[in-house]
Image: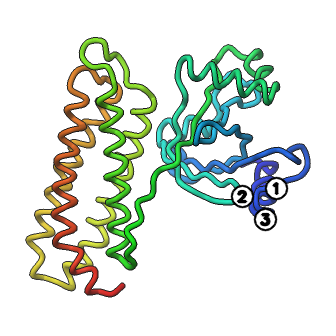
Amino acid sequence: MSSFNHTVIEEFRANAGQVGGPFEGSELLLLTTTGARSGKPHTVPLGFVRGDGELLVVASAAGADRHPAWYHNLIALPLVQVETGIEEYEAVAVPVEGGRRDELFARIVRAEPGYGEYQAGTRRVIPVVALQRTHEVPSQEGGIAGKLLDVHGWLRAQLALVRELARAEPSGAGAASIGLQLRQHCLAFCHSLEFHHRSEDAGLFPYLEQQHPHMREFFRRIGAEHRVIARLQEELVRALDAPGAGFSERVERMSRELEAHLDGEEARLLPVLRALGA
């Protein structure tokens, strides 16, 4: 991170999003992506424009011929953190495509003419990225049981959105590529699901098995289900680059398998977690 960006970020966080200097009076946000190679958080201050229920940022890199690092990060790992000075939340970063990108970019240029100058100075098409806030599904329950329900609710909501987007996508021989809206939400879902299951396998389940040895066979079965779902997840991610026919069917199968898995896990685990009182 440059020393300039570091100074802006510190001032932003210390003053509820207000900064001075060249950005005085401007609306800024802080965008935190995950490094595509390093896996480490990467935070940058960015100007933004308000869209229809979402915030829009421009990957201008001051008119450079290469996309900025944060854009490459969000293409690889679409789940990002957004800070506005008033609130902080999770979002899926989705580059806007085609005519809608051109329409939004023209609107942005009318508000901030500098972006038009940046575009005129480079051959690349400067991306416009929509930061689509993920829908939180609070369980109204505390402790570990509540956290499990929160994660499961988020996964169910994201998968429902992916299913809806997949059903709207063209299929068959004409489906040469997946739309970025579907791609980014599918990747966000898949990465989050993988992290959740790894955390269960490495942390929660061994701990619970120590407390409840009679549940050993249940945890073995759940682990096997995790492996089946992981294979489906890997197939989905591969299909994003070569969708063709059957992508929607893959999403539907994932939905059936995951819903049955989450329902079964909750039925057996929630009474145990509630009894812990943590």
Kind of residue indicated by mark 3: Ala
**Contact (Cβ within 8 Å) of mark 1 with mark 2:** yes
The residue that mark 1 highlights is 18
Q: Look at 32% across and 44% down and name the residue there.
A: 160
Element marked by disc 1: loop
Mark 2 surroundings within 10 Å by alpha-carbon count, few (fewer than 14), some (14 through 19), many (20 or more): some
Give the percent coordinates (x, y) of residue 253: 18, 40
Q: Residue at the spot x=45%, y=52% of the render?
A: 135
58 left or right, relative to 208: right
The residue indicated by pointer 3 is 14
Q: Is residue 147 left or right of residue 106?
A: left
Q: Tag 1: residue type? A: Gln
177 vs 52, nearest the viewer = 52
Q: Secondary structure at mark 3?
A: helix
What residue is shown with label 2? 85
Residue 220 appears in the picture as rendered: yes
> x, y percentage for residue 138?
42, 65
Q: Label for residue 182? A: none
